[in-house]
Image (cartoon, rainbow, N blue to C red):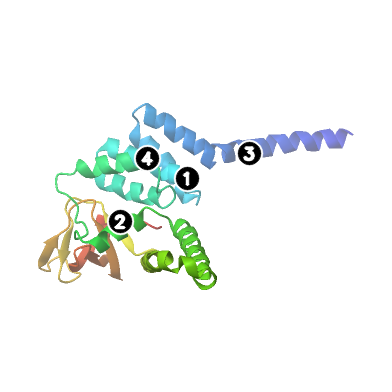
Amino acid sequence: MKKLIQFTALFFLFCVPVFAQQKEESPVYLFLKGNIAYAEGKFDEAISSYENIIRQKSESGNVYYNLANAYFKKGETGKAILNYERAKLFIPADSDLKANYEYALSSLKESPVALRKTWFAFVERLAQGLTIDGLTVFLSAVYFIICFSWTLWLFVPALREALRYFIAIIVIVFIFAAVNFNKKITHLGKDAIITSSQAQGRFEPLDNATVYFKIPQGSRVEILEDKDNWYKVKRLDGKIGWVKESVLGLINL
């Protein structure tokens, strides 16, 4: 019995501090700590707490959303937009996220490069409002509707006239949704946000290379290639150039 008591005392002596340390480093603790720091206006501390959570691979929409808010309050709008985009991967339909994201964009001195105003761009914007999982569910539902409608076409002749245009429209919707689903898959790890107000696209990955164009802060770009500390990127309007790694952040880490 005496040995058991001694063992128990040693267990608490050495293990309890370890458990306490683990608790202080846990995502829940860090999230609450970040929230308190944010409420007190200590935005650097809040950012540090939220980024520690992400480094622990415990990312979530709420963590990225709060991190974005902290960056915005600190005045780093590009990083705020980047983290709002990351939050949209988890909670794309969140109304507060949409409102803060739009407000951050409107606060920029120069508007980010946007998609050309075409009907196809409108479809792409709608697809951006869904996660990959959301698009998967949507495609499955549309596919079921197509199959059900086709069954009615075959076995209920009286409905053929009414179903003719409906099936055509739903097939078109399915095709566009499938195209955007494929685009989301192929762009994983390739889409980035410009976080610096000094981003310049150059013809070559060199500091003294000729500047081809400027990229406004908050713009979305697609990464085509990387070399040393440079990225070859494509803007939404199709222009391609080389930018330094330090001026952007990947949306999907």
Q: Earlier in the sequence, mark 4 or mark 2?
A: 4
Residue under label 3, please give it. Answer: 19
Residue under label 1, please give it. Answer: 53
Residue 195 screen position, x and y as percent: 25, 51
Element marked by disc 4? helix
Residue under label 4, please give it. Answer: 95
Element marked by disc 3? helix
Task: Check disc 3: other Cα within 10 Å, few if <14, some if 14-19, many if 20+.
Answer: few
Task: Check disc 2: other Cα within 10 Å, few if <14, some if 14-19, many if 20+.
Answer: few
Q: In whole angstroms, how far apart are the C-alphas of marks 1 and 3? A: 18 Å
Residue at 46% from the left image edge and 59% from the top image edge: 138
Q: In whole angstroms, how far apart are the C-alphas of marks 4 and 2? A: 16 Å
Residue at 52% from the left image edge and 73% from the top image edge: 154
Q: Nearer the viewer, mark 1 or mark 4?
A: 4
Q: Do the numbered discs 1 and 2 sit on residues whose CB atoms are within 8 Å?
A: no
Q: Quadrant of the N terminus?
A: top right
Residue under label 2, please give it. Answer: 125
Q: In whole angstroms, how far apart are the C-alphas of marks 4 and 3? A: 38 Å
Q: Nearer the viewer, mark 1 or mark 2?
A: 2
Residue 228 screen position, x and y as percent: 29, 69
Q: Earlier in the sequence, mark 3 or mark 2?
A: 3
Q: Which mark is residue 24?
A: none
Residue type at mark 4 is: Ser
Residue type at mark 3 is: Phe
Residue type at mark 1 is: Ile
Residue type at mark 2 is: Arg
Element marked by disc 2? helix
Q: In whole angstroms, how far apart are the C-alphas of marks 1 and 4? A: 24 Å
Q: Which of marks 4 and 3 is nearer the N terminus?
A: 3
Considering every residue shown, the one lying at the far top of the view is 40
Q: Nearer the viewer, mark 1 or mark 3?
A: 1
